Amino acid sequence: MDSLPSELAQDEPIFAPEAFNLTPQQAELTARARRFGKAVLAPRAAEYDREARFPIENFRDMHGEGLLRICVPEEDGGEGADFTTYCLTAAELGRYCGATALSWNMHVCSTLWSGLLSEDLEMPEGERAAHRARRAKHYARIVRDGKIYSQPFSEGGAAAAGAVAFGTEARPVEGGYIINGKKIFASLSGSADYYGILCTERVGDEAASRRNTLYLAVPADAQGVSVVGDWDPLGMRGTVSRTLLLKDVFVPEDAMLMPRGVYFQAAGRWPHMFMTLTPTYMGLAQAAYDFTVSYLRGELPGMPPVKRRMFPTKQIAVAEMRVMLEQTKALWFQAIREARPDPTREQVQRAYAAQYTVMENANALAAKAIRTCGGQAMLKSLPLERIYRDSRCGSLMLPWTAEICLDRLGRDTLYKPGEKDD
């Protein structure tokens, strides 16, 4: 699509560049995302939600805006954004269409994990060179052709939470692997060009081990790949996260998105990698607040210019919402800036606290917005009820659900590494 006109940059940034000391790249990308979200994502969001249809048009337009390549290294034709920069940009998109932002996360993680994260981890130089050569092929598809990658994670058991090995298995054969398994809640199913499959490498009768996790890019049109089931959920309807089946699917050796053993290393040494779902919900939290202020001021597009701001109860409610929003922003911003290999125990605990806070507070703010704005705000012709439904999904998302965050935070606070009760 053509470049977006600058006059569309009307909304204030979630994180003001001066106040939060953003880099020039962060300021530019977040401004680009805000203009794109307002002009392109917001007008289409209700239709995708109503029809539970994947926002493929948004992704096509993202290619033209350079957003599909945001975390592709510069030497491979991308923007070279780091973890914090990606998160800030994703939050701005989440303000305008939660389903698009969340699906986009699944695509971007394929490049973030194979790029920045992999570079931070240990591997022999020969293996690193081979990895860079392999990933360059994947990056070229994205940069040149706008190909879309997904990252189906869940399987219906404990694997997505990191407790056991993935049930989807890859067995080595001459020239590559044969994959068998199933992924549920597979976002972008039926729309992605490649599925980034986390699976367990199995050789002979050896026991399945999380250490043997592979990350393989499976072409959507490969023989043995199928998408089944319906998709009619409460929220995030545009992600179209149906069930993905893999039956004797062959992929070549160069399908590896991370070298053997590197995902297991990343899961232990780069835990903030599992926070990439939170930016969408940070954006939804901001969107709920934005809606409330515009509605009470009589400035909501498509609504009569009726002011409702003169009631003290509504003024207090907005003040409470602002306090919650600022608390959420501050904690989350600190956590994403601390993302790095081998974070301290305190930094990991703060990541859990930030994940929990964003996922819970996004919905709490949306609920408060509905109560404060009143009955008309629940109409499907307005975005608030969609924001409410989308925001309710965050606490349920693996690998760090709200319950898992609380469990780990409590345990890791009361027990130092290696400690046990007598």
Image (cartoon, rainbow, N blue to C red):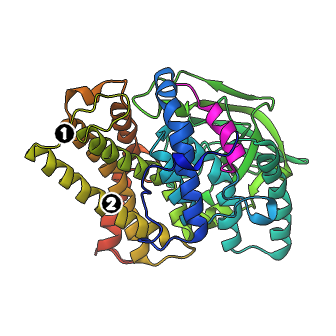
Highlighted range, magenta: 52-68
**Residue, disc 2:** 328
Q: Nearer the viewer, residue 378 or 171?
A: 378
Q: Identify the residue at horizontal 54%, vertical 34% (top origin).
A: 239
Residue 381, position in %: x, y? 37, 24
| Relative image position of residue 407 (x, y in whole percent) | 33, 59
x then y, percent, for residue 10: 46, 49
- Which quadrant of the figure contains the N terminus? top right
Q: From what the image shows, is residue 374 above or below residue 160?
A: above
Does residue 205 appear in the picture of this structure? no
Q: Amino acid at mark 2?
A: Thr
Gap between marks 2 and 1 measured at Cα: 20 Å
Left or right: 418 as drawn, with respect to 186: left
Which percent across, then down, holds residue 344? Answer: 46, 78
Q: Nearer the viewer, residue 362 or 156?
A: 362
Identify the residue at horizontal 69%, vertical 64% (top origin): 80
